[in-house]
Image (cartoon, helix red, strand yellow):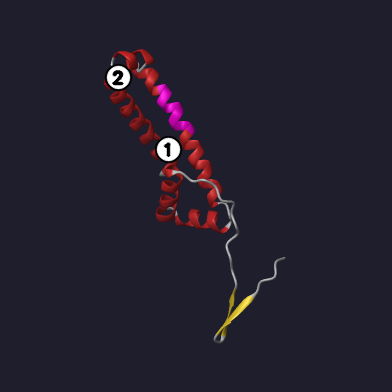
Amino acid sequence: MENITYTRQGDYLIPDLTLPTEPELPLGRYALMHRDYLEQHKRVTYLNLLTQGRLNEHLYQTEQTAIQRLELLTKQLSAEQGVTEELKEKAPMQWVGMMNNIRSQAEELILNELIYR
């Protein structure tokens, strides 16, 4: 069992509480978006992860999953819509426009499936 130390504040003893240390992990935009969502809309989950020292790990895993899912969805949607390397060579501007649309579709799915849940 841990010994808890206290600091006297006037007539009161206040426990010296600290959050567990977490490893520093690189957090990208999806992780930061998910953190903001948890903090604003899922406060209990956010505080539980924070006080258990698991918030950064959770955010990092969410980021990695989002990136993998984005790549997979982009490939699938490209194949479904006929966006090929051949199209890229023949009509580069059309290819760019179609890829931007595909990426937007994939990102919207990711935001709904992973980030804002």
Residue flagged by tag 2: what amino acid is it?
Pro
The residue indicated by pointer 1 is 113
Q: Which residues are magenta?
A: 68-76
Helix or strand or loop: what does disc 1 sit on? helix
**x then y, percent, for residue 108:** 36, 36
x, y percent for residue 49: 54, 54
Nearer-N-terminus badge (1/2): 2
Query: Which class describes the residues within 10 Å of circle 2: few (<14), some (14-19), or many (20+)?
Result: few
4 to the left or right of 100: right
Nearest the viewer among 16 and 49 is: 16
Q: Foreground mark, 1 or 2?
A: 2
Relative height, residue 87 to residue 39 (above, below): above
Q: In the image, what residue occupies the spot 66% across and 71% down?
A: 4
The three-letter amino acid code for the residue at tag 1 is Glu
Quadrant including the N terminus: bottom right
Can you name the residue that lies furthest to the right here?
A: 1
